[in-house]
Image (spheres, rainbow, N blue to C red):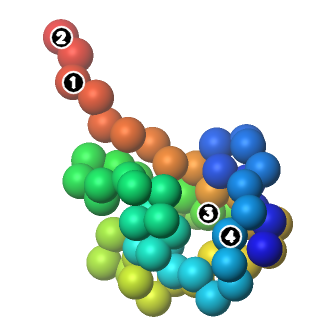
Amino acid sequence: MQVYINNELQEFDADLSVEKMLASMQIKPNGIAIAINNTIVSKSKWDGHFIKENDKITIIKATQGG
């Protein structure tokens, strides 16, 4: 299945949750936020929210600054 992650086309297997997608990309879940099709998906729902063909996923990583 094809999805867009931060505006880049990526290929994944079907039946993939947000949590498993992050694991397959080797992204640690701490300090990030996920939006799918411009809707925030809360961290507590990542394991039950499944990615669909052509979803537009935004991954935002928190940074510190001063």
Residue at disc 1, secondary structure: loop
Residue at disc 2, secondary structure: loop
Provide the residue designation for mark 4.
Answer: 12
CA separation in Å, label 4 and label 2: 37 Å
The answer to whether the residue labelled 4 contacts the one labelled 2, judged by CB atoms less than 8 Å apart, is no
In the image, what residue type sits under mark 3? Ile
The answer to whether the residue labelled 1 contacts the one labelled 3, judged by CB atoms less than 8 Å apart, is no
x and y, in percent, of residue 57 in the image: 63, 56
Provide the residue designation for mark 1.
Answer: 64
Nearer to the camera, 61 or 1: 1
CA separation in Å, label 2 and label 3: 29 Å
Q: Residues within 10 Å of mark 4 (few under 14, many from 20)?
A: some
CA separation in Å, label 4 and label 1: 31 Å
Provide the residue designation for mark 3.
Answer: 36
**Identity of the residue drawn at 31% across and 78% down:** 44
Figure quadrant of the N terminus: bottom right
**Sequence-first tag of 3 and 4:** 4
Q: Residues within 10 Å of mark 1 (few under 14, many from 20)?
A: few
For discs 4 and 1, the disc positioned in front in the rendered view: 4
x and y, in percent, of residue 30 in the image: 23, 53
x and y, in percent, of residue 52 in the image: 72, 78
In the image, what residue type sits under mark 2? Gly
The answer to whether the residue labelled 2 contacts the one labelled 3, judged by CB atoms less than 8 Å apart, is no
